[in-house]
Image (cartoon, rainbow, N blue to C red):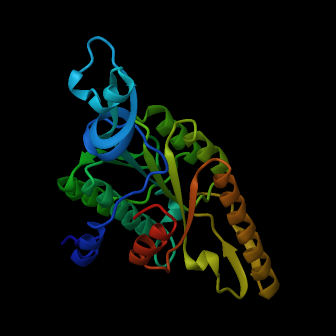
Amino acid sequence: MTTATPQLFDAAFVRKLDRMSLLMKRAMAGDLQGERRSPRRGSSVEFSDYRHYTSGDDFRQIDWNMYARMERFFLKLFVAEEELTVHLLIDNTASMDWGEPNKLQYARRTAGALGYIALASLDRVTVTAFANEGGKQLPGVRGRRGAIPLFDFLQKLPAGRGGSFVESCRRYARTARNAGPLILCSDLMDTQWEEALRALTVRPFEITLIHTLAPQEIRPQLDGDFRLVDAEGGDPIEITADLESLRRYEQNLQQWRGEIESFCSGRGITYLFADTSSPVEEFVLSTLRRRGVLR
């Protein structure tokens, strides 16, 4: 007997997602006709600029009012409305499969919500998971019908073992066909997190980092002697947890988060911290809107 995979969202939450859209800091060129502004010149209703008429141009684009004033021919240029590729990257390494609520499940649901919003706006969505060599990927899907394979991929996405976070980011930046909005969900439990993020910035992605931690990592409730085991294969550590050691831990955690946020700020990356004790619905509908990722 097989166990049913839990649904990512209920219908009421999906209806709320239908009324939202991803915000872009800058216009980016896409592939096909969609609902997003692009720096390419096209024939949408949003005026962009003028340029001089040259032989072979479409005379229907001539602005006759400008001709009446200047006695010269000018073409109206408009901002093209084009499809973008929205890149969803999920860190599904062993350290993410931990915590209550579970970090990986939180990342699945957050990515699912953002992916659905993009699909409803007719953008193309790809999903890539980073654990194991080569990762696991959902090729681009588009439109609301794409929500079915998107949700199915995320619901069945397992935690992985092994692989290099930084090499995965380098490979993605090297092989992704199109730039566009890129959303990375990770706990950054990797000593090379700076190199990994830096690798993504070599392409003109518009990056949002959702730094995902469980409440047991943020506010550990420990007392006494413990043996800590690294979920990704490092050597175990013997510790004694008391008020002083917990205080130092929390200071170090805040310092680490500050370093990540500062690193991101200096490279145009939007940094968002996600505590999995905060419901995904609240994080998406409130935090992401407040931080200008959604509207």
In the displayed structure, 165 sits above or below 279; it is above
Give 291 or 80, whichever is nearer the viewer: 80
Query: Which residue shows up at 39% across the image and 30% down it?
Result: 50
On the image, the x and y values in percent for residue 91 come to: 48, 55
**Image check: 47 left or right of 205?**
left
**Image check: 170 left or right of 148?**
right
Q: Which part of the image, by quadrant, shows the C terminus?
A: bottom left
Give 51 or 150, whichever is nearer the viewer: 51
On the image, the x and y values in percent for residue 173 come to: 50, 37
Query: Which residue shows up at 46% across the image and 42% down it?
Result: 133
On the image, the x and y values in percent for residue 125 come to: 32, 48
Query: Which residue shows up at 26% across the image and 66% down it?
Result: 18
Give 39 or 153, whichever is nearer the viewer: 39
Q: Which part of the image, by quadrant, shows the N terminus?
A: bottom left
Give 21 or 44, whichever is nearer the viewer: 44
Residue 85 in view of the camera: yes
